[in-house]
Amino acid sequence: MNKEKTLVLIKPDGVKRHLIGETLKRFEARGLKIVALQMAHPTKEQMDVHYPKDKKWITNLGTNTIKSYEEFEVPSSLKEDYNTENPHEIGLKVREWLIDFMTSGPIVKIVIEGLHAIKMVRKIIGQTIPAFSEVGTIRGDFSVDSPALANMKKRAVRNLIHASGNKQEAEHEIAHWFSPEDIYSYKTINDFI
């Protein structure tokens, strides 16, 4: 069976909006198991290690920003807002905004375990851009931010929650945020089905 672990971070906006309990409830209601849970106020160094530094990932951030300018018809130009139209250079700036945002207040770190946990969790939280998240997902129900507004204000999109995107990310992020002794193993009713 594809039982796996994934990392979830309730971002500062989710904590400030009192969505910790609601978020945990949705994972547990789906049959996923919370095996580690802790509140923290991350440092810039911790967030710098958390977010990838490889050129492909950073360029993808920039490319997505460029797409959002087109899709949301942002009135200013990339050249005006970033002094460049280069996706990698834009991505570096967006990564910096992410780190600033994630260090602006406390977060809640969670390790979730279950069948297909990585895909399940991402399905429950919804798409990265709140405007594209389905009603019934955490972001679709509770997030009102837009990339157009975030870009104009030169800040990260406030989308409440982070979840590992794949197995490699999950392994890296779990090891970064938790020591092995912080992660618990126990049986739930779903383990006996």
Image (cartoon, rainbow, N blue to C red):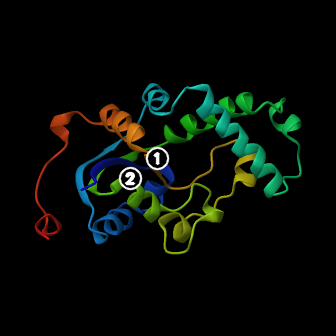
Query: How many residues crowd mark 2 within 10 Å: few (<14), some (14–19), many (20+)?
Result: many
Q: Which residue is mark 2?
A: 118
> For this view, does 125 lie left or right of residue 174?
right
Residue at 32% of width from left, 68% of height from top?
Answer: 25
Q: Dot 2: what SS?
A: helix
Name which of mark 1 and mark 2 comes first in the sequence: 2
In the image, residue 166 sits, relative to residue 187, either above or below, namely: above
Compare residues 114 and 148 and report the one nearer the observer. Answer: 114
Residue 60 numbered mark, or none: none
* Observer-nearest of 64 and 49: 64
Q: Residue at x 37, y 67 (%)?
A: 22
- The type of residue carrying mark 1 is Gly
Looking at the image, which is closer to me, 3 or 157? Answer: 3
Q: Residue 165 — which label?
A: 1
Residue 41: in sight, yes or no?
Answer: no
Looking at the figure, which quarter contains the C terminus?
A: bottom left
Badge 1 element? loop
In the rendered view, would you say 63 is above or below 139?
A: above
